[in-house]
Image (cartoon, helix red, strand yellow):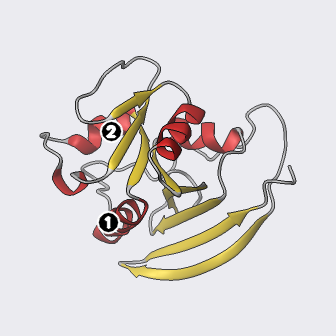
Amino acid sequence: MKNILWATLTANGNYAQSGPENPPKKETLDDFFTHAKAAGNFIVGRRTFEGMRGNGGPGPFADIDIVVVSQSATEIPGVKVVRLPEEALDYLKENGHQTALISGGADIHNSFLGQGLVDEVIFNVAPVLEGRGLNLLIDKDNYCFKHVQLLDCKPLGSGVVQLRYAIDRTVS
């Protein structure tokens, strides 16, 4: 199974934090919906999922398998809840998915990256600089690097640029 991590970053490399003063760009939301629909699923952390859910209802994700990785939640109606990244991937594989879209929350992203479970990353770089942001971490304790290969680079509109990289999982 191909595991794709999808994230929006700021121009200075932090995970983009959206809120009333910095709402997500329409182009990034549209891009996420496109990737989720193509994969037929997405994996997300509980806090990010609760923020996405808003006033409830399935919305545009009615026919998409949603997997929430959470250490505290045991059940959320309409979604599969697991405790570990590997459990999320196993669930999607058992349900016939060829691609897993890892989509939300710095902790979830860093967990999948740190365990070497990501084959490809899609970064939508938003035109904003952020002072205190959350960062990509592939190893919290040691200096390390991962080789990546640029697969695609394209503008999405409104100053958002998408970078797509393959990760070489054989070298760390």
The image shows residue 130, relative to residue 133, as above or below, that is below
| Amino acid at pointer 2 | Phe
On the picture, is 8 further left or further right than 138? left
Q: Position of residue 64 (x, y in %)?
A: 31, 52
Q: Is residue 132 visible?
A: no
Res 25 label: 1
Mark yes or no: residue 114 visible: yes
Graded by Cα atoms within 10 Å as few (under 14), some (14 to 19) or many (20 or more), the crowding at tag 1 reads some
Q: Residue at x 25, y 54 (%)?
A: 63
* Left or right side of 86 for 130: left
- Name the residue tied to disc 2: 49
| Marks 1 and 2 in Cβ contact (< 8 Å) | no
The residues tagged by marks 1 and 2 sit, at their Cα atoms, a distance apart of 18 Å
Three-letter amino acid code at the position of disc 1: Lys
Q: Nearer the viewer, residue 58 or 158?
A: 58
Considering the image in quadrants, where does the N terminus appear?
bottom right
Determine whether the residue tagged by mark 2 lies in a helix, strand or loop. helix
